[in-house]
Image (tube, rainbow, N blue to C red):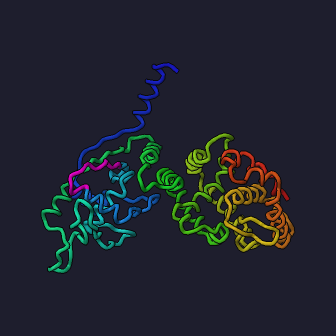
């Protein structure tokens, strides 16, 4: 590659990302938020992730005049700003001021704790209904916080369609890092919010929840959304051998955002059929290891991939069986035998790279679950 080619690529890339930026006070940011001109918590982000100690340290930094990292916003077609990076900083300031809302409802204002530099912050809050409350910021302190300035970098609407996601992904390096799927969810919201809602709706299906049996911590990290995405992606955006699994799922998410209404309706039918059949046959535990007597341990992602992909691809043949009783009996036998199958055990165990696992188990699943 020549320097001229690199320069041309660089100029093209710069044209795809149109930015602006300037300093704003926290008071101005709060005003934008209250007038719905700033959306701070898109659907793909959890609003409150910081511990109270982290929130206090941020407010301490403002009071001490320490530099605060910039925040990034995307300017939508209607002119409204959507926060891309800086959620915890902005939400903490709004929480302190008593204007932060969750699901449209104001939450209790933030109460600070003491720090090494400012021990008197202990118990301090923005305001109080009690006239004799001594743990309240006076007007000079309130103004100092409201006038504190923070750099706002703006990604304008003229930017390339994918630029907002790319920026969000690269900025996601803070101490309260989002999971891969939470970042991936940003793709869905930014590119096709209807598809994101479809994934969420599938994740909420009771038979799906009862068969995957995730912990609350796993659900909080959006692993259920990832499993829905995998289920569709393996057929609609086939895995390319050697591609990093997370990179593959990122690319697949963008491709799946292009599904038509008719294609989504078809996927809904396949999804519902798969998990209703699994629930009817197993009443849960299907993705847990079979020890010869019962399913034990935790649900395994490799088992999920193989069983659901194999069933979905072979749906018509499985549906052609005479009745539900035969389908259930056949499926139970295949799933139990899976755990001793040589190919499955070779590529599903610990130490097997995700790329190797998918490249070998997805084709295996199609053959294994042919009736």
Q: At which x and y percent is residue 131? A: 15, 79
From this view, report whether residue 227 is shown above or below residue 66: below
Residue located at (43% from left, 29% from top): 10
Left or right relative to 117: residue 170: right
Residue located at (33% from left, 72% from top): 107
Picture mark count: 0
Q: At which x and y percent is residue 112? A: 28, 68
In this view of the protein, can residue 255 be seen by the observer?
Answer: no
Q: Which residues are magenta?
A: 61-72
Quarter of the image that includes the C terminus = bottom right
From this view, report whether residue 119 is shown above or below residue 75: below
Front in this rendered view, residue 31 or 292: 292
Q: Is residue 63 magenta?
A: yes
Q: At which x and y percent is residue 218? A: 56, 64
Residue located at (72% from left, 69% from top): 296
Which quadrant of the view contains residue 147? bottom left
Q: At which x and y percent is residue 66? A: 24, 50
From this view, report whether residue 106 is shown above or below residue 168: below
In this view of the protein, can residue 173 be seen by the observer?
Answer: yes
Residue located at (18% from left, 80% from top): 130
Left or right relative to 197: residue 369: right
Front in this rendered view, residue 275 or 60: 60
Q: Residue furthest left?
A: 140
Q: Is residue 370 magenta?
A: no
């Amino acid at each position: 590659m020549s320097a001229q080619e690199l320069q041309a690529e660089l100029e093209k890339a710069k044209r795809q990302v149109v930015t602006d930026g300037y300093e704003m006070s926290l008071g101005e940011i709060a005003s934008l938020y209250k007038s719905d001109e700033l959306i701070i918590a898109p659907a793909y982000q959890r609003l409150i992730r910081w511990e109270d100690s982290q929130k206090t340290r941020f407010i301490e930094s403002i009071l001490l005049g320490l530099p605060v990292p910039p925040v990034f916003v995307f300017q939508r077609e209607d002119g409204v700003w959507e926060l891309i990076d800086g959620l915890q900083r902005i939400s903490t300031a709004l929480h302190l001021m008593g204007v932060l809302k969750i699901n449209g409802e104001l939450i209790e204002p933030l109460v600070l704790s003491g720090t090494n530099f400012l021990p008197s912050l202990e118990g301090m809050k923005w305001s109080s209904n009690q006239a004799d409350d001594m743990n309240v910021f006076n007007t000079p302190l309130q103004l100092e916080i409201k006038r504190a300035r923070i750099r706002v970098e703006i990604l304008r609407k003229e930017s390339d369609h994918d630029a907002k996601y790319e920026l969000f992904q690269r900025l996601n390096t803070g101490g309260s890092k989002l999971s891969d799927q939470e970042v991936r969810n940003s793709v869905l919201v930014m590119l096709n919010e209807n598809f994101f809602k479809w994934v969420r709706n599938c994740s909420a299906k009771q038979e799906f929840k009862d068969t995957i049996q995730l912990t609350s911590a796993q659900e909080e990290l959006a692993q259920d959304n990832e499993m829905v995405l995998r289920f569709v992606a393996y057929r609609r955006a086939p895995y390319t051998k050697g591609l990093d699994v997370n990179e593959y799922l990122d690319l697949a998410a963008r491709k799946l955002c292009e599904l038509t209404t008719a294609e989504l309706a078809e996927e809904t039918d396949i999804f519902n059929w798969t998990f209703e059949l699994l629930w009817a046959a197993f009443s849960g535990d299907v993705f847990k290891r079979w020890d010869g007597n019962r399913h034990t341990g935790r649900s395994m992602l490799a088992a999920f991939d193989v069983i659901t992909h194999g069933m979905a691809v072979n749906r018509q043949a499985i549906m052609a069986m005479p009745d539900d009783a035969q389908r259930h009996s056949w499926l139970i036998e295949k799933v139990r035998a899976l755990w001793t199958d040589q190919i499955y055990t070779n590529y599903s165990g610990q130490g097997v790279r995700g790329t190797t696992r998918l490249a070998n188990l997805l084709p295996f699943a199609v053959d294994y679950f042919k009736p």
